[in-house]
Image (cartoon, rainbow, N blue to C red):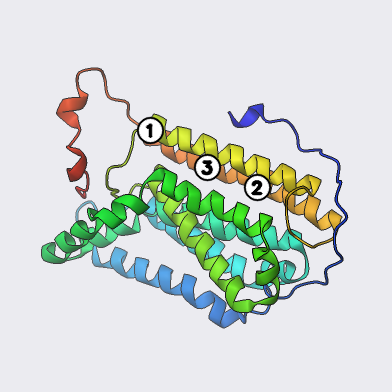
Amino acid sequence: MLGQRAPVRLSGAMTFLAHPAHHHGGDLGTLPAVIGPVLLAAGYLTLVALRRHETRGWSPWRTASFLTGAALLAAALTGPVASFAGADFRGHMLQHLLIGMLAPLGLVLGAPVRLLLGSLPPSQGRRVGRILRSGAVHVIANPWTALMLSVGGLAVLYCTPLYRITATGPVAHHLVHLHFLLAGYLFAWVIAGPDPAPLRPSVPMRLLVMGVAVAVHATLSQLMYAGLLVDVPVPPDQLRGAAEIMYYGGDIAELLLAFALVSAWHPLRHGSASKKESPPGRRLAVK
């Protein structure tokens, strides 16, 4: 599916507005920007430490995955990436790729909810389970909802005046970052997350949703490369470079997500599904 795409080499056809370097991505101080990822990592490691005396313990691969996700998030918000994002639209796209796709995948594969549920007292664990089974979570955890929030958010950002607003408004800029992080996490969770999810659809259905995401991603990157239908006032070379980062970087993230999905897929033989699968409303059992 991914290998069938045509190379992106569309000719530019739009005259872009000259746009001075926007510094919203690089104006974050290192300490405030790194607090969130550090707190995430510290909370996760604390829960892992609480389970160190258990016979099975906690998977070091999941720990490594979560810490990698936290590190990618910190790298996106600080240092050279943040400085690059503040001066060049290609850096902005690299920052969004890290925040919205790669860091969420690492965090999700760390199975933090499963770790939390296994560390809580039974009464509190049941409370969290009831929240996960609530109607609101059912709606949010629907793959099509996650698709609309993640990939749809990209279209809204780059095809409407929203990007211009974020380029001059630090609050809007940081809210967009938060949206991409949460939407990216939600999408990775419902597609391939090891954490329990309510009414998670079949793997073929999730692959279909992924296919739509890939198609929308590719279309948007080609439109950006050509300068068509996007409202991003940056020099053409930056726009084309950012489109290539979106296209090829998105490929890498989507391949990793697809690999995570199919590697955990154990197709049931005909006739055994009814014996092994739980009723839809009871798929939140935690190992």
Asked which quadrant contains residue 221, the reply is top right
Q: Is residue 205 left or right of residue 237?
A: left
At label 2, counting other C-alpha atoms closer than 10 Å, the crowd grade (few under 14, some 14-19, many 20 or more) is some
- What residue would you read off at disc 3? 256
Q: Which mark is residue 250?
A: none
The amino acid beneath tag 2 is Gly
Q: Nearer the viewer, mark 1 or mark 2?
A: 1
Residue 244 coordinates in the image, percent (x, y): 74, 47
Sequence order check: which comes first, mark 3 or mark 2? Answer: 2
Q: Looking at the picture, does residue 269 appear above or below residue 78?
A: above
Q: Is residue 1 left or right of residue 127?
A: right
- In the rendered image, which quarter contains the N terminus? top right
- What residue would you read off at disc 2? 249
At label 1, counting other C-alpha atoms closer than 10 Å, the crowd grade (few under 14, some 14-19, many 20 or more) is some
- What residue would you read off at disc 1? 203
Asked which quadrant contains residue 234, the reply is bottom right
How much space separates mark 1 and mark 2, taking CA atoms? 24 Å
CB atoms of marks 3 and 2 within 8 Å: no
- Closest to the observer, 172 or 28: 172
